[in-house]
C-alpha cells in the first residue's frame, strides 16, 4: 500500500513509468511548431527541444550506468557535461520526429534493462563523482528527470502561448 508522500512507483515499476512518459514527449515533439520547440525563454535555459534531447541522453546514459553496475559493481560511472552536449550536439536543430523516435528507443532500452534487474541487484552501486549511486537510485532519477523536464517543456510552451510575438521570450 502506498503511504502519503511515497512515490507512485517503485524500482520494479520504473520501467513502465518511463515508457508512459515517452508518449507525452512524442506528442509535444510532433504537434508543436518547430519555432516554439526551438525558442529559449531566457538565457541559460534550454528550449523545449533541447530538454527533450537531454532526456533522451539521460535515458541512454542511465542505461549504460545500470549495465556497468551489473557487470562490475562498484565501478566508476560515466559523467557527461550536459550543457556541453546540448551545444556540441546542435540540439536546437534536431528534427522533432526523429528526436521523438530516438527518445522512445532510449526509453525502451532503459526500461528493458531495468526490467531485467533482479530484486537482489537494486542495491548494487557504482561511483559517480565520489558518491555511491545504486541501481534503484538511478531508476528513481530517470523517472524524476522524465517528469521534471516534461514540466519544464510544458511551462515554456505555455509562456509561448502568452507571448507569441516575442518568439516565446518574455
Image (cartoon, helix red, strand yellow):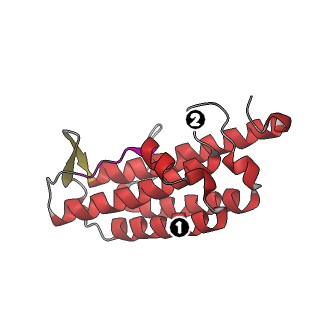
Q: Nearer the viewer, residue 71 or 4?
A: 71
Q: Mark 2 — residue?
A: 45
Q: Position of residue 55 (x, y in %)?
A: 50, 53
SS for dot 1: helix
| Nearer to me, 122 or 50 | 50
How many residues crowd mark 2 within 10 Å: few (<14), some (14–19), many (20+)?
A: few
Residue 100 to residue 32: above or below: below
- Regarding mark 2 in the picture, which secondary structure is present there? loop
Q: Judge left or right: residue 68 versus residue 72.
A: right
The part of the chain drawn in magenta is: 77-82
Using the rendered view, name the quadrant where residue 93 is placed.
bottom right
Q: Position of residue 80 (x, y in %)?
A: 35, 48
Q: Residue at x 56, y 53 (%)?
A: 91
Side of 22 relative to 127 (left or right): right
Q: Marks 1 and 2, how far apart in space?
A: 22 Å
Residue 120, can we see it? no
**In the rendered image of this protein, does residue 32 appear above or below residue 115?**
above
Residue bearing mark 1: 102
Q: Which of the two labelled residues, at mark 1 and mark 2, occupies the earlier sequence position?
A: 2
Does the magenta run of residues contain 81? Answer: yes
Q: Is residue 74 left or right of residue 133?
A: left
Number of labelled discs? 2
**Percent of width and height locating residue 168:** 76, 37
Q: Residue furthest top?
A: 170
Q: Which residue is situated farthest in the right direction here? A: 165
Q: Is residue 140 magenta?
A: no
Amino acid at each position: 500500500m502506498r503511504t502519503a508522500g511515497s512515490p507512485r512507483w517503485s524500482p520494479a515499476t520504473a520501467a513502465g513509468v518511463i515508457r508512459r512518459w515517452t508518449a507525452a514527449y512524442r506528442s509535444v515533439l510532433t504537434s508543436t511548431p518547430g519555432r516554439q520547440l526551438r525558442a529559449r525563454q531566457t538565457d541559460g535555459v534550454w528550449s523545449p527541444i533541447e530538454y527533450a534531447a537531454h532526456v533522451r541522453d539521460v535515458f541512454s546514459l542511465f542505461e549504460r550506468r545500470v549495465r556497468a553496475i551489473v557487470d562490475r559493481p562498484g565501478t566508476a560511472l560515466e559523467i557527461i557535461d550536459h550543457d556541453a552536449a546540448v551545444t556540441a550536439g546542435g540540439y536546437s536543430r534536431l528534427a522533432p520526429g526523429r528526436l521523438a523516435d530516438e527518445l522512445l528507443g532510449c526509453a525502451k532500452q532503459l526500461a528493458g534493462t531495468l526490467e531485467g534487474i533482479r530484486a537482489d541487484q537494486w542495491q548494487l552501486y557504482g561511483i559517480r563523482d565520489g558518491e555511491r549511486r545504486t541501481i534503484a537510485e538511478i531508476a528513481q532519477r530517470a523517472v524524476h528527470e522524465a517528469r521534471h523536464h516534461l514540466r519544464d517543456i510544458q511551462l515554456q510552451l505555455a509562456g509561448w502561448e502568452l507571448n507569441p510575438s516575442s518568439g516565446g521570450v518574455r
